[in-house]
Amino acid sequence: MISDGNNNQLMSEINVTPFVDVMLVLLIIFMVAAPMMTQGVDVALPEAAGTSLSRDDSEPIYVTLKPGGAIYINDFPVDVDRLKTKLTALLKERPGTRVFLRADKTISYGNVVRVMAEVKASGVEKLGMVTDPLEK
């Protein structure tokens, strides 16, 4: 308790200003650090000209092809033989979820088409292809 200078009564109020200041600083630190903590599978995407798709709030499913033939659903590795089964189960839990295919630019066209066929067979009607913007 703090005594004010004029009379000898004690103040029983809590000063929350330092608490608010600390919380605002922590908020800014987390806002800056959160995008850096995003993990994913690293691939060298091909470049293409085009427009971005509109975004909605639902989290999409990413199917990623890495060099060497490794396939991932989001960040989890999966065999091409089990890709259809896993995607079908995911889409039953989250109907209407967007699915995007990310393939390294060194992957052969035949492997990309094979994975696209498995994705389509799992019930995906619209499959988005992820690329980097074309450098001019």
Image: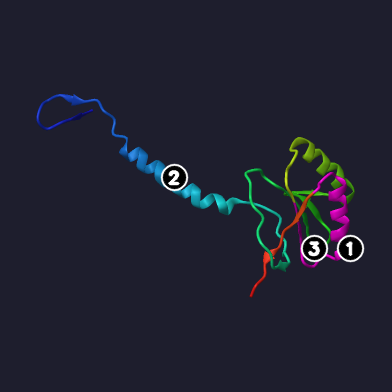
- Frontmost of labels 3 and 1 is 1
User: In this picture, which residue range is highlighted in magenta?
Assistant: 100-125
Q: CA distance from mark 1 to mark 2?
A: 49 Å
Q: Secondary structure at mark 2?
A: helix
User: Sequence order check: which comes first, mark 2 or mark 3?
Assistant: 2
Q: Secondary structure at mark 3?
A: loop
Residue 6: x and y, percent? Answer: 9, 30
State the residue in front, 77 or 118: 118
User: What residue sits right under mark 2 in the picture?
Assistant: 26
User: Sequence order check: which comes first, mark 3 or mark 1?
Assistant: 3
Please identify the quadrant where the C terminus is shown. bottom right
Residue 64: x and y, percent? Answer: 77, 55
Q: Is residue 52 above or below residue 83?
A: below
- Amino acid on which the number 2 mark rests in the picture: Leu
- Queried whether the magenta region covers residue 101, the answer comes back as yes
State the residue in front, 75 or 135: 135
Residue 97 visible at all: yes
- Amino acid on which the number 1 mark rests in the picture: Gly
Mark number for residue 110? 1
- Queried whether the magenta region covers residue 105, the answer comes back as yes
The quarter of the picture where residue 57 lies is top right
